[in-house]
Image: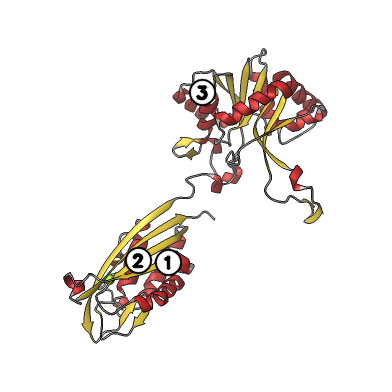
């Protein structure tokens, strides 16, 4: 079996907002294109691989291949103005005695050898095979924002690559398309134009085409942060925790309102952002912060978060106080903090604990708080 592979990698990646070819963007530290090359290179049946890329990307793609030291011959050829032309150029670059060909998009890095094998099994009988998955959404045909009709979903499949063909058949299909000016967004369609049936092999939903930055795993990054704070309990001060004033004969001493819980959460947020600590941002020598509500400071930290396109996944915090009993207040504190951070209450958890009479907390000299947060990057 003479089995060639054409990897289409000549797209500009405009929707990725990428400079240079998107197939060279890293996924878990490896260029996207490397995944397909490695997959095909490791397949016993594959004899040749051709990567079609833009002229400007020839060199970096060649460099990548050099580094990979593939077992099979991997050739890089310049593509055309549109995908169809690029694939045709790739087909022509394969040896003339090629019997079968796998056409694959370089922007589908999550293909598996198992998926390719299933396609190969089917192609011997059918000569034209497309990997596809049933669509999950209801699809409408729309013209000028008006629904024209609704094809039955049970008949609709989303077609992916690899698509696998008899070399002779797909070359004939491309030749005819070129002669007659037929354009299509996939290679199957050209074979369909020839009147040759195309067999569908059920694929995998994970075999996505990376089109926008959100598709890139790792585009979504997470950051964990931790915070800790202590304030002394004194007479004649209000006790404020998470912005809630709690009736008690003592309150916390500090430059601001000494809201120890909010401070711990702010420190956790700043920590997750790599932004140092609360003392650097809101020095207790600054008269602007004298007696200020810590919720106001928290909202300023939230502003930093938004500037960095970060969002809170969740916050977990614990207040360590011997007295007063905080359990009746946990709900109100949670609601207050969630409101101040602009997140759903389910994303904020507040716990209360004593220190079993031990240490400064146990002696009622002060209250401590600890917080952990998880932030997610969000691209918008
Ligand atoms: Mg503090």
**In contact (CB < 8 Å): disc 1 and disc 2:** yes
Question: Tag on residue 348?
Answer: 1
Q: Is mark 2 on a helix, strand or loop?
A: strand
Quadrant of the image occupied by residue 174? top right
Identify the residue shown where x is 50% and y is 44%: 217
Q: What element carries label 3?
A: loop
Position of residue 376 measured from the top left corner of the image (x, y, whole percent): 45, 55
Sequence-first disc among 1 and 2? 2
Q: What element carries label 1?
A: strand
Quadrant of the image occupied by residue 82? top right
Say which of 256 and 119 sits in front.
119
Position of residue 190 measured from the top left corner of the image (x, y, whole percent): 76, 30
Counting other residues with Cα less than 10 Å from the Cα at mark 1, is it few (<14), some (14-19), or many (20 or more)?
Answer: many
Identify the residue shown where x is 47% and y is 23%: 66
Cα separation, mark 3 vs mark 2, equals 49 Å
**In contact (CB < 8 Å): disc 3 and disc 2:** no
Position of residue 259 measured from the top left corner of the image (x, y, whole percent): 31, 75
Counting other residues with Cα less than 10 Å from the Cα at mark 3, is it few (<14), some (14-19), or many (20 or more)?
Answer: some
Per the image, the residue denoted by label 2 is 317
Viewed as shown, does residue 165 lie left or right of 73? right
Cα separation, mark 1 vs mark 2, equals 8 Å
Q: Can residue 78 be seen in this view?
A: no
């Amino acid at each position: 079996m003479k089995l060639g592979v054409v990897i289409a990698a000549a797209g500009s990646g405009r929707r990725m907002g990428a400079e240079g070819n998107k197939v060279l963007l890293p996924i878990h530290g490896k260029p996207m294109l490397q995944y397909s090359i490695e997959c095909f290179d490791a397949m016993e049946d594959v004899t040749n691989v051709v990567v079609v890329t833009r002229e400007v990307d020839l060199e970096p793609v060649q460099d990548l291949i050099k580094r990979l030291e593939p077992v099979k011959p991997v050739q890089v050829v310049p593509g055309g103005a549109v995908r169809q032309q690029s694939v045709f150029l790739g087909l022509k670059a394969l040896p003339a005695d090629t019997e079968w060909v796998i056409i694959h998009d370089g922007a589908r890095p999550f293909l598996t050898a198992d998926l390719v094998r299933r396609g190969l099994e089917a192609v011997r009988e059918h000569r034209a095979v497309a990997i596809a998955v049933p669509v999950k959404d209801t699809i409408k045909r729309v013209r000028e924002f008006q629904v024209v009709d609704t094809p039955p979903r049970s008949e609709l499949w989303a077609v992916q690559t690899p698509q696998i063909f008899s070399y002779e058949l797909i070359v004939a299909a491309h030749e005819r398309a070129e002669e007659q000016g037929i354009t299509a967004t996939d290679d199957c369609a050209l074979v369909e134009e020839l009147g040759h049936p195309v067999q569908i092999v059920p694929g995998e939903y994970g075999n996505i085409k990376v089109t926008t930055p959100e598709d890139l795993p790792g585009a979504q990054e997470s950051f964990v942060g931790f915070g800790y704070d202590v304030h002394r309990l004194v007479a004649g001060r209000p006790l404020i925790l998470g912005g809630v004033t709690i009736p008690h004969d003592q309150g916390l001493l500090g430059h601001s309102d000494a809201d120890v819980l909010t401070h711990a959460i702010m420190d956790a947020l700043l920590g997750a952002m790599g932004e140092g600590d609360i003392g650097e941002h809101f020095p207790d020598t600054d008269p602007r912060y004298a007696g200020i509500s810590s919720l106001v400071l928290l909202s300023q930290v939230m502003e930093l978060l938004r500037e960095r396109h970060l969002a809170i996944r969740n916050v977990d915090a614990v207040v360590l106080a011997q007295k007063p009993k905080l359990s009746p207040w946990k709900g109100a504190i949670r609601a207050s903090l969630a409101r101040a951070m602009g997140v759903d209450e389910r994303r904020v958890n507040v716990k209360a604990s004593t220190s079993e009479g031990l240490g400064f907390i146990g002696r009622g000299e002060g209250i401590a708080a600890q917080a952990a947060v998880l932030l997610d990057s969000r691209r918008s």
